[in-house]
Image (cartoon, rainbow, N blue to C red):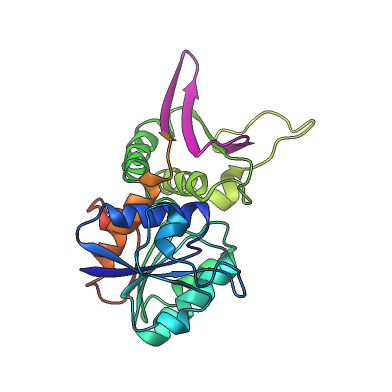
Amino acid sequence: MTRIAIVGVAGRMGRTLVNAIELEAEATLAGGVVAQGSSLAGADVGELAGVGKRGVVAVDSLESIVDDFDVLIDFTTPQVTLANLAFCAEHGKRIVIGTTGMSDDQLATLDSYRDRVPMVFAPNMSVGVNLTLKLLETAARALGDEGYDIEVIESHHRHKVDAPSGTAIKMGEVIAASLGRSLKEHGVFERVGQCGPRTDKEIGFATVRAGDIVGEHTVMFATEGERIEITHKASSRMTFAKGAVRAARWVADKESGHYDMQDVLGLA
């Protein structure tokens, strides 16, 4: 039985994760963390998530539940996540990270813990998205250097704070790697005014923020006479939560390392 604690347990994703753990026979909810000084500290985590009392009280510090959990799930902010990663390394815990919007320096800091803590880090925990990444790898190798323009279009709810989404960037990275290109060099994230025609090797990105869209990603391979589109649409956060719980169970017995959902799903 994998004992799981959730950071940001009172948020939209945190509440969904509680529900996902409820559906998993081999995992148990062992703790929930809210923001320091939050009025929700002391509330029953199950009641916060709408599943009824579970006898697990929300706390505002990891230290207070350090002996209660095996794996921490973190879908918060880069600064909070890195602090929690350091905590897990210090106390021999494992961690599943779904936080997006990290800078290059923050990603380097995260990776520096690979020899000190078992972690699964992925911008998207959905099984379907990670299968889509494999499809994009195949499509890019077959089409990308044969005169096909590549565009990534992503849509999310109005509250999302980073853009493009971590999933969209990951898709661009997979495509670029498959074609031997650098996304830093060939990624185009803005087109305004007289920007000129697209170049042959660029990978374009477009972002939509509107309403309550959970997450939609389409990669377009377009050439003269035809267009191929590979699309993933999420209609519920539960798909991400179930993937995160699956990752938590998978990493529970792993040695220190920097893993992703491709490893969890056996697609690597």
**Extreme residue in the top direction:** 225
Q: Nearer the viewer, residue 22 or 134?
A: 22
Query: Relative to 191, is 124 on the left or the right?
Result: left
Q: Total marks drawn?
A: 0
> Percent position (x, y) of residue 100?
53, 56
Residue 139: percent from left, percent from top? 36, 34
Identify the residue at horizontal 73%, vertical 30% (top origin): 196
Q: Quadrant of residue 206?
A: top right
- Residue 28 image offset from top left, x and y in percent: 27, 65
Question: In percent of the image, x 32 and y 51: which residue is there?
Answer: 242
| Residue 71 vs residue 182, the one in the foreground | 71
Left or right position of 209 against 231 = right
Q: Quadrant of the C terminus?
A: bottom left
Taking the spot 46% from the left edge, 49% from the top edge, the residue there is 170
Q: Position of residue 169 (x, y in %)?
A: 52, 48
Magenta: main secondary structure: strand
| Residue numbers of the magenta segment | 203-232
Q: Is residue 84 left or right of residue 230?
A: right
* Residue 86 highlighted magenta (yes or no): no
Judge whether residue 207 is colored magenta.
Answer: yes
Q: Quadrant of residue 238?
A: top left
Q: Relative to 11, is 115 above or below?
A: below
Identify whether 45 is placed above or below 177.
Answer: below
